[in-house]
Structure formats: C-alpha cells, structure tokens
Amino acid sequence: MLGAATKRSATEEGKQAMSDSPVGVTSTDPMTKAVRGAKTIEVRDVDLYYGDFQAVEGVTMTIAPNKVTALIGSSGCGKTTFLRSLNRMHELTPGARVDGHVSLDGEDIYGRGVDPVEVRRLIGMVFQQPNPFPTMSIYDNVAAGLNLNSRRVSQSQKDSVVERSLHGAHLWEEVKDRLQKPGSSLSGGQQQRLCIARAIAVEPEVLLMDEPCSALDPLATLAIEDLIAELKNRYTIVIVTHNMQQAARASDVTAFFNLDATRPGHLVEVGATNEIFTNPSQQQTEDYVSGRFG
Amino acid sequence: MESASITDSPPLARPSSLLAAGAGWRRRAKDRLMTVLIAGAFVLAMIPLISLVYEVTKRGIPGLSLAFFTEDARGVVGEGGGASHAIVGTLVITGVAALISVPIGIMGAIYLNEYGQGRLRRALTFFVDVMTGIPSIVAGLFAYALFELFFGPGIRLGVMGSVALSVLMIPIVIRSAEEVLKLVPNHLREAAYALGTPKWKTIVKVVLPTAFAGLVTGVMIAIARIVGETAPLLVTTGVVDSMNSDPFDGRMQNLAVYAYNEYRSPGVFKQAAYDKAWAAALTLIAIVMLLNIAARLVYRRYKTEIR
C-alpha cells in the first residue's frame, strides 16, 4: 500500500542515513514504515489552497525521524505554506484548504475525528519573528505550553520543566537569575531561543522551524544552528530556510521547492543534503544551489 | 536596442553651490506662518473648554460644602441639605450600567474580531454602528417600556437607568474593544496555537491580557460618555430627595437629574439652589476627570510593548 516498506530496528534509527540517492518527484519514494516510537512524517500528494488559488501542488516525501530536513527554494514557492500544513496551521487562514495525506507515525493527522489542537501539541513550531508572549515573564513563557494546555502540573514539576527546557535551548545560564523578567527584555537571539525552549517544553515529537534565524545576526544564528544539531537527537526537525549555506551546514536531508509560471509551488527534488548540493539530479536544483537564480 | 536610462535624461536644475542656493528664508517664513496658524487654531479650540471648566469651577465652588457631600435633600425646604443621595445614585447607576455593558461589550468585540465571519459579522457590525447613534432619550424610553411590561406603568427603579445607559454604553465598548483586539498581532495567537492551545484559551490567556490596557481605556471612555446623561434617567429613575443606594428599590437620584431639578425648581432660596446645581455639575466633571486619570494610570502600568 505504501510502497516498499523498510523495517528499522529502534537502535538503528537515527544512525542510518536516509535513502541513499536523491529522489526525484517522478519515481516512487521508498516509504519507511514507521516503527512505534519513531517520529516520522509521511506526506503524500499534498495540495494546498488559499481559496481557489493553489499554492502548493503534489508534494510527496518522507520526513525521517531524528534528522534535520531543510526545505529550500525561492520566495513564494510554498515552503512555508507546506510547513504550516504539517501541524495543521495552514487551515487557520480563512479559506485555506488541504488536500492529500499527511501522517505522523502512521496516523493521519487530517483524519476525521482528529483534533487539530492535539496535533499541534505533538508537532511544535518556531516562527521567523521571535514572538514571546509580551505579558508573561521568561518563566511563564517557557511554561506557557503547560499553562495553556490545561495540563495539571505541580509547581515543582513546572520548575523542572522550565529549567530543563531552558537548558535544552542553551538559554539557562543567561536567564537563570532573571526568570521573572518579561520575555520581551531579551535580545533577538535570546528571544528566539526562548521560543524554542517554549516549544520543547511541551515535549513535541516534531519541531517545525520557519526561517528561525532570518531575523537574527550571524552569531545568534550560529548559536541556533548548534542548538538544532543537538535537538535533532531528540526530535524530528523540519526547517524552512532561505539561506542555502545554512541548509548545507545544518541539515541532513534537503528538499528543493520551486515555482514557475505554469505550475504552483511543487517539490522538485528531495535527498541527502550533500547529494543535493554537490550532485543534484534535476537541472533546476543545480541552478538554484549554484546561485544562478533565487 | 535603445532604451532610456536614468543617465540619459537631462539633469535637474540645481544651484551651482550650497551657498548660492540662498538662506531659504522664504521657506522658513512659510513655516513660521503655518506654525502660528495651527497654534492659533489649537487655542481657538481650547477656549470653549477652558472657559467651561472655569465657569463651572467658579460657580460650583460656592455650592460645595461638607453638607453637600454628606446630606441628602430629604425633608429639606430651605437652604440646607446636600447631594449625597445624588452622588451615591450616580455611582450606583453608572456602576451597574458598567457591570452590564462591559461583559456584553467585550464578549461582543471578541466575537466580532475572533470568530465572526461573513454575513452575520457584517450584520452585527452594522447594528452596532446604528446603536452608537441612538439618541439617549430613546434609550431611556426603551428601558422604561421594557420595565413597564413587567412592573406596570409608573415604575421607577435605579436599575432601569442602568439598563438605559447600557444601551448607550455597549456599542461604544464594542467598538473600542474591537479596535484594541485588532491591534493584538496575529503572530501571538499563532504562537499559542502552535503550542496546541485551544482557541478560547488563546483568547483568554494571551489576547485579552495583551489588550488589557486598551480595553480598560475603552471602558473608561464609555463610562465618561454616559455619566452625565440626563434625559434617559429622567424617565427611568425619577426624581427623589432621599438617599437610596438599592438599584432595585424605587426611585434613585443622580447628579445630572439633580442639577437639572435644582435649576428648574429652585424653590424660594434660588441662589442656594443654583449653587447646588453648579456644584453638582462640578462634581460630575470631577468624577470624569478622576476616571480619566485612573484610566491613564492603568494604561501606563499595564500596557504591553509589542515589538
């Protein structure tokens, strides 16, 4: 049903690389059958609409667990729209529509009876502009996921979650003495790390990042990239980026999206990052990564 | 292929040097003229306001006394008595009106801004706009007719006045609350949704706290609008001389109607009555001013800077 199924043992997961050769859109993708506990997202024939306008067409790919998958492509080609469809944020726009199949660990996230709020608890998101809640302190911002999700958590549990998340986001040392200060009192890079801490505090299975470094200076960007390299050991990460060098540095798998006059945004090619950047199978990909356009 | 480029067209006329361009005195003179005209317009606009405050203060002060604030007018036919019943009445009636209007208004604004779509939303916005234009006497007659249905003719209650004032207050609260809610950036809502927060909780825990200062200001403005309304209260709360702080227990006096009454039926001691009327007007202005100051303090303390 899903094509060739490859069973992976839990210990191998995370150590093996993704499929060996770049996969073009025309061939059948070897879908990996998700092992219980792994965090794989499978996408099949996804079309995304804003009203009557089709923004993204026919995306089919597998997002492997414990890997960083980068979505690259020129402006307007639908990368962010596609990203937002993975945690059911796309449908929040009035008139927006999703056709196709998206599943997390084999479960269809758009299935009947599936609560989008639950989906978003499992698939977290970090946005381009850092957006800590302005009325809350640093502590409350990190704990926001717990407070807002009506999970009954004791104060000491909350304390440990906040500390763990801030450690995980490499922010603890810088803010441990001023947890009660407002979230907006931090610098841009710190605010973005705060947003990452907030996202991981609810222990999602997948972390989506929409150009998380584009509003930051190079030093802060480097800090975030180091963080991502560490986070992938625990989460599946999908990152949209305009910055090709970042994709080359920070990701394991790269998916190249493109747009032209005749077609809506579509997936041109997906494969291991070093293959995409050194030996892509499509001419468009070659043109984009070598800077001829975009 | 010949194509026009920016370097082909003749250069714009320019003075040969900065000094040759002249000291620009003509422009500065024009600047000064406009500044004078605009400042003059501002002074002109301020004159009625300042003269009003001055007159009310000048004429109101003689009417102020300890008795004014502590005694009511029960059984008084001479110069004595005070307006404590009117002050308490204004506070009670306005307070109950706010109690009715604020929840309804804010929830209405939340609906219009966060949930409303399409035709229903447009229809509701239209009706809210119509309501902002309702003459206050109409609101008063509406409240009277409503209570007459249940309690028979001639009914006078403090709460009726509150209902009438609510009709005037609700559209103002809705309008200003809607504007403030619109100002809350969408990316904050998205941040909450991305954490897996249900919509209603996002509104209660993220949107409303962020908009809090603006909402308070909007409510204060609405209160200031209705605190001096006379016509609707004449037909709903009536005129009474004794203290009544129970909105459900018969007639209740208030400052606006009190001032009107003292002016219209001053009795034998005319000057004392007029003094009391002016004092009531001064008290009303003072209440509005205090509300405004409180609103500013709340705003400054609770406003959220959104980057």
Image (cartoon, rainbow, N blue to C red):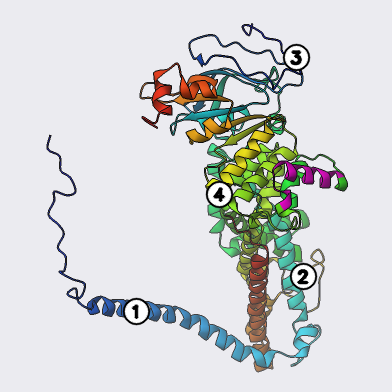
The residue singled out by tag 1 in the image is B37
Q: Is residue A118 visible?
A: yes
Q: Is residue B200 magenta?
A: no
Q: What chain does mark 2 sit on?
A: B
The residue singled out by tag 3 in the image is A9
* Amino acid on which disc 4 is placed: Phe
* Amino acid on which disc 3 is placed: Ser
Q: Closest to the observer: A144 or B124?
A: A144
Residue at 67% x, 59% y is B166
Residue A276 in picture, x, y percent from top left: 49, 22
Reading the chain from its start, which is encountered first: label 1 or label 4? 1
Q: Is residue A212 above or below residue B146?
A: above
Q: Is residue B186 visible?
A: no
Q: Which residues are magenta?
A: A157-173
What is the number of callouts on the image?
4
Magenta span: predominant SS is helix
What label does residue B251 carry, if any? 2
Tag 2 secondary structure:
loop
Reading the chain from its start, which is encountered first: label 1 or label 2? 1
Quadrant in the picture for the N terminus of chain B: top left
